[in-house]
Structures are given as structure tokens and as C-alpha cells.
Image (cartoon, rainbow, N blue to C red):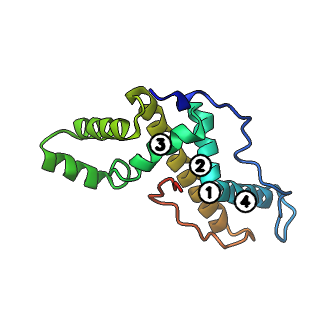
Amino acid sequence: MREGCAASWRPSNEFQPDEQFNTCEKDTMASAYYQHLKASLEILTTLDGQLQFMTTRTGFSNECLRRVLIHLNAQPLFGDEGELEARARNAGVSVEQYAVEIVRTIAGLSGEAYAVVIPILSAVGELNSRRHEIVQELARLRASGDRYSPDLHKNTSGIRCRIS
């Protein structure tokens, strides 16, 4: 394992917007909640927000996360389940065996231990789930008929972590 994967803990403020809530036209808890969700989603679509989310979950440094994520983005581990199943079938192995091989490949390419890659993959899954939950909740609030800002303009389905 590389030395750079030592735990790097920072206080978690991943869902705190930089400024006070803009409650749109109504001064209600629901509109403040909507603005809070929008700010959270915006943070989680930035590289810094994604790295902070995953650092909080794994304790690994940004450098360690980047070394693994750059190789993860090149692998077909996340995305359409049917696609993953088809690739496993084409390789003549089970989906689980195929996923393990991909993880081994990522570990080998990144130079990180298998035990480092697994929690990072788990954190990526949690990040994608959290973004999906936020999008669903924003859509539910928007459809409720209250006067929320209708500019839900970010499509986060199938988002991968961006590494620069």
C-alpha cells in the first residue's frame, strides 16, 4: 500500500451552503428545505464536494482517492446493471467474479491495496445514491404544487466522479 492513503479527517460540512437559504417567494420551511437540497446537490456535483464526501466516508486522503478514482472511471463497474451482466457473460464469469476482477485491476493500476479500493468503491456508490435521493426529493417537492424554483437543471443519473 502506498504511504499517501493515511487517514485525512476533516470536519464534515458537505451539505452546508455557503450562504443563507434563499427561500424564493415564500418564507416557509419547505422552500428552505428545497434550497438546502439544491445547494447540497450542487456541492456533490463538484470535484471538491465529491472528494470531501468520500474522504468523510473512507478517511483516505484526496491524493489516494484520486489515484483510485482515475482508474475507476475507466472501468465499467458502475452504470447499467444489464451492461455489467452482459460483460460478465461475455467473459464467461459471474457478475461477482467480474466485479472482483475489475477491483483487482483498479488496485493494480492505482498501486493501492485491494483493502483500500473496496471502501472507495463503496463511497462512490453512497455518493451516487445520495445524489439520486436528492434529485428524487427535489422532484417530489417540485411536483407538490408549492411555488419552488422549477430549475432542476442537473441530471445526475449515472454520474461518475470527475477527476481532474
Q: Secondary structure at mark 3?
A: helix
Q: Secondary structure at mark 2?
A: helix
Q: Pick the residue in front: 127 or 51.
A: 51
Instruction: Indicate the secondary structure of the residue bearing disc 4.
Output: helix
Labels 2, 3: front one: 3
**Three-letter amino acid code at the position of disc 3:** Arg
> 33 and 22: which one is in front?
22
Q: Which residue is mark 1?
A: 46
Earlier-in-chain disc, 4 versus 3: 4
What crowding class fits label 2: few (fewer than 14 Cα within 10 Å), some (14-19), or many (20 or more)? many
Q: Is residue 149 above or below residue 39?
A: below
Residue at the spot of label 3: 67
Relative to residue 91, is residue 163 drawn left or right?
A: right
Q: Amino acid at mark 4?
A: Tyr
**Disc 4: which residue:** 34
User: CA–CA distance between discs 2 and 3?
Assistant: 14 Å
Q: Earlier in the sequence, mark 1 or mark 3?
A: 1
Q: Are marks 4 and 2 in contact (CB under 8 Å)?
A: no
Depth check, mark 1 against mark 3: the one in front is 3
Disc 4 versus disc 3: nearer the observer: 3
Q: CA distance from mark 4 to mark 1?
A: 19 Å
Q: Determine contact: label 1, label 2, CB under 8 Å.
A: yes
Q: CA distance from mark 4 to mark 2?
A: 21 Å
**What is the C-alpha distance between the residues marked 1 and 3?**
18 Å
The three-letter amino acid code for the residue at tag 2 is: Gln
**Mark 1, secondary structure of its residue:** loop
